[in-house]
Image: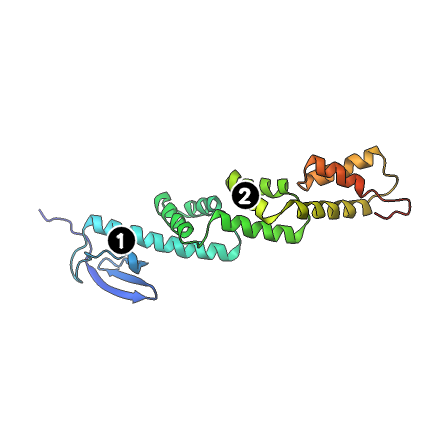
Amino acid sequence: MAVDQGPTLVSVDKIGNGVRLSLSDGEILELAAESLPPALPAQGEVLSPALLEDLREAAARKNIARRVFKLLDRRLRTSRMMRRKLLEEGYSAEAVDAVLDRFEAEGIHSDRHFAEAWCRDTLRARPVGRRYLENKLRQQGVNADLAAAVVGEQLDPEDELGRCRAAAVKWWRRQRGLADTRTLARGVRYLLGRGFSPALSNRIIRETTPDDEGKT
């Protein structure tokens, strides 16, 4: 009874920083040069099932790495967001985790990089406080401790104070009528919604209350 042999290796071609393997059954595998096994059979020889599986996994990692770069070109993503997207596209969890772990180890992409860039972009766009930044980072999959550390680096207390004051002044300019208790409460709620602490919100909304001429 004939043994069902696997495909044979037809050719090995260099492509940039990787290699392309052509198999006798028409399958093409592209993988990183460092993923090429040292015991690769000569051209025309049969690939064992175990070796073929290893080559396919290496090719999957190469495809995932290429896909990650494309996803990052479009917008910032956390590792959790990236992982979910890649799994939805049909890549195996093992291969996805291997690529994301390697990218983090090599400093190509990590949740810290994401958090730093996201905080900088957000702070350029609007006056918000620490709580806002930390909550949004956690919602996007950044670890709570990492989120707190990055926000602390990106927004010091003095900067947060200035941003709270700027937000309060802007809010007061949109108000009409007297600065009564109810209006003050609305102002505090507005600042709380921007991620400033209750103590800071209460203090700043009162310090920026318009004077008799309507100026802050």
Q: Residue furthest left?
A: 1
- Residue beneath the point at 71% across and 45% down: 164
| Front one among 151 and 139 | 151
Residue 98 vs residue 48, the one in the foreground: 98
Mark 1: secondary structure: helix
7 vs 132: above or below: below
The residue shown at (71%, 48%) is 162
Reading the image, the residue beneath label 2 is: 149
Q: Earlier in the sequence, mark 2 or mark 1?
A: 1
| Place of residue 4 in the rendered image (x, y in percent of width and height, measured from the top left) | 15, 49
Q: In this view, does 190 lie to the left or right of 99?
A: right
- The residues bearing labels 2 and 1 have C-alpha atoms spaced at a distance of 40 Å
Residue at left 56%, top 41%? 148
Is 52 in front, or is 160? 160
**Is residue 76 something one can see in this rendering?**
yes
- In the image shown, does 167 or 140 lie closer to the viewer? 167
Label 1 crowding class (10 Å Cα cut-off): few <14, some 14-19, many 20+?
Answer: many
Residue type (three-letter) at the residue carrying disc 1? Leu
**Residue under numbered circle 1:** 55
Please tell me the numbered disc located at residue 65: none
Residue 90's x, y, as percent?
A: 39, 47
Do residues under tags 2 and 1 come within 8 Å of each other at their CB atoms? no
Amino acid at circle 2: Ala
Identify the residue at horizontal 54%, vertical 48% (top origin).
Answer: 115
